[in-house]
Image (cartoon, rainbow, N blue to C red):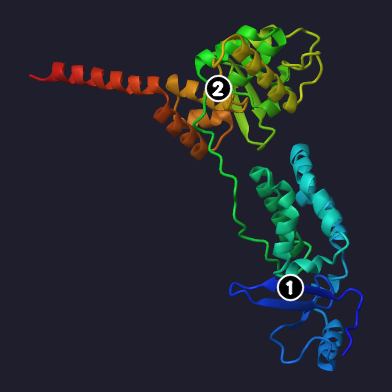
Amino acid sequence: MPRVEVKGLHRVKKKLANGTICEYHYAFRGGPKFWDSWEPFAAGTPEYWNAYWEKLGARRSPAASKGALTTAEVIRRYRASPDYTSKDIRTRKDYDKFLDPFEAEFGEDSIRLFEDIESVAEIRDWKQKWAHSLREYDYATAVVTLFLNWAKNQEKCILVHHHIGQKKHYKAERADIVWRPEEIQALLEVANEREKRIIWAAQGGLSPQDVGIITRHHVEETPGGRRIQWRRTKTGKPFNIPVTDDLARLIDTTPPDQEYLVVSLRGKRLKEHRVSGIVRDLKARANEKKPGSVRKELRPYDLRETAATRLLRAGCSLNQIAVCMGWGVRHAANVIQKYVALVPEESDRVRDLLRDWEQADRRRRP
């Protein structure tokens, strides 16, 4: 029987573990499956077309009644929902980096495409464009899963999806990377005045997202000094940073007509990506002046961990460190644990404490 072509009919081939090639036919892409290689009748036979028309005209469930929605339409609805609009601008931009190409790839398809387990392989193929960066590859995975969860649980336009429990490939543990005092000093030695202010703010505990948006209004008087009170841009968690000597110098030398405590090299609003760029440039200049003076793997974000270790050295408790940095207690504990294990002088400090205890213990003996 000659093969009849039907517009919209979707065929998928899959190679099984034993090498067998199986074929699955769907009424349309994302639609119901009506035939596979295990059926007792062959593709193209009258029984085959009867199964096709039966599935195509089958009574639809409430979720299936929305099957006419395209993926692009559901993405539009998601972007209008509180689940998306409640996110900060930075997070929405991060989501859009993957939602836009996802819509370009699947936008014309029915949202019910993702009820089919075979769609996981199609999404995996789409994600290959980020295979060079495992971090971005995993972020694409997370955004797609979040969107499909919303389509299923909130919009209820699909009954199920299979893009869950996907393996993560990017593993980065940077809690054990802290700046040494001599490395920070190497940056300051090659920095101009505006660049120094960025370093002062960062080693005081401000993240690259927050460095450029802190003003005098965020500085509060305390019974014994001052503090910077703020909610972290990234997480929204409140933190209270004590105004150290570096931060005091930063605050007290800010020109009266300057709104932000730290500005760009041209005196404009300082953006997060420029903080990273300026620190990279300082590292290059410091290493050009004295090769090997600053490790290449260090980043501006690591200065926050460095600030936390300074609080530890000062004798602050874990809770105090967590509050000052706007962290959860678990993350603070992780940072401190790594620091104690890696920094040589901390081992010396433990040795000195043990020696003092032993000497005091001998004096107490009769």
Q: At x 62% / y 12%, what residue is drawn?
A: 288
Q: SS of the residue at dot 1?
A: strand
Q: Is residue 293 left or right of residue 276?
A: left
Label placed on residue 295: 2
Q: At x 78% / y 43%, what residue is drawn?
A: 92
- Quadrant of residue 68 in the image? bottom right
Report if residue 237 is visible in the image. Answer: yes
In 3D space, how far apart are the residues under numbered discs 2 and 1 (Cα atoms)? 50 Å
Pointer 1 local density, CA inside 10 Å: few below 14, some 14–19, many at least 20: few
Type of amino acid at the residue the image marks with label 2: Arg
Q: Is residue 64 left or right of residue 250?
A: right
Instruction: Looking at the picture, tell me which residue is in the foreground, 213 or 113.
Output: 113
Against 320, residue 235 (above or below) is below
Q: Earlier in the sequence, mark 2 or mark 1?
A: 1
Instruction: Looking at the picture, tell me which residue is in the foreground, 189 or 65.
Output: 189
**In the rendering, at what x and y percent does residue 216 appear?**
72, 16
Q: Is residue 42 left or right of residue 279?
A: right
Label placed on residue 13: 1
State which mark lies toward you, 2 or 1.
Answer: 1
**In the rendering, at what x and y percent does residue 112 appear?**
79, 69
Tag 2–tag 1 contact (CB < 8 Å)? no
Label placed on residue 286: none
Pointer 2 local density, CA inside 10 Å: few below 14, some 14–19, many at least 20: few
Q: At x 79% / y 68%, what residue is drawn?
A: 113
- Quadrant of residue 155 in the image? bottom right
